Image: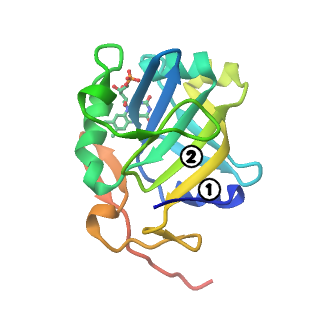
Amino acid sequence: MRVPVELRRSYKLLNHGPTTLIASAHGDRVNVMAAAWVMPLDFEPPKLVAVISSETYTRQLVEASGELTVNVPTAAMAELTMVVGRVSGRDEDKIAKHGIRTAPATQVRAPLIEGCAAWLECRVLPEAEISKRYDLFVLEVLAAWADDEVFVNGSWQFTRAEHRTIHHLSAGHFLVIGDLLRAAR
Ligand SMILES: Cc1cc2nc3c(=O)[nH]c(=O)nc-3n(C[C@H](O)[C@H](O)[C@H](O)COP(=O)(O)O)c2cc1C
């Protein structure tokens, strides 16, 4: 079940380095793409950064709307992650074509992608120069959610293999994230 995550703890949803799905919406267009280069930037107010190439349709929708959602797919969604990372929303409606289930977000018009392990609703902070020069977007997290089966009391607790999140290496190869290693403090 999707449950809210306190904003000051929302960095934990990305700290373990998962590949993400960025969903965007503007006018009557809704789109989703894979994004591996997404990371936390600050605790409070929570911020993150995402690389969104100028060649993507997502970039167009994000610049027009000033909003997006960052969704954290599970190992069961690896194939889908590759599909939405290889095809452009300019060429097809990926959400309709691949039967991607979405739910409304609370703070932004971009949807939440169902089946994910975590979700962050974000607004674009006005850093046009950085975006233009580096394709880098600075985002403020407005709302955060996690699947309470895998994110329990503020910690990831991966039990079932298909619920683990995925770290992209290259060319469709992922590492499945999830074994806890406790280092002495
Ligand atoms: C696993 C994976 C990770 C990716 N990570 C990023 C990324 O961090 N930033 C980016 O701009 N594109 C990334 N891409 C490429 C976009 O997902 C791809 O260009 C996509 O087709 C863009 O879709 P759109 O044109 O509908 O926005 C990635 C692709 C894959 C398969």
At a point 27% along the width and 67% down the height, the residue shown is 161
Relative side of 6 to 70, left or right: right
Q: Residue 72: x, y in percent?
A: 44, 50
User: Looking at the image, which is closer to me, 105 or 146?
Assistant: 105
Percent of width and height locating residue 52: 50, 28
Residue appearing at x 55%, y 25% in the figure: 135
Q: Is residue 2 left or right of residue 166?
A: right
Using the rendered image of the protein, determine whether residue 179 is visible from the camera's viewpoint: yes
Residue under label 2: 120
- Which mark, residue 136? none
- Quadrant for ligand 1 reads top left
The location of residue 158, given as percent across then percent down, is 39, 71
Q: Amino acid at mark 2?
A: Leu
Q: Kindly state the secondary structure of the residue where label 1 is placed.
A: helix
Residue beneath disc 1: 11
Looking at the image, tell me whether mark 1 or mark 2 is earlier in sequence order: 1
Secondary element at tag 2 = strand
Residue 161 position (above or below residue 174):
below
Q: Residues within 10 Å of mark 1 (few under 14, many from 20)?
A: many
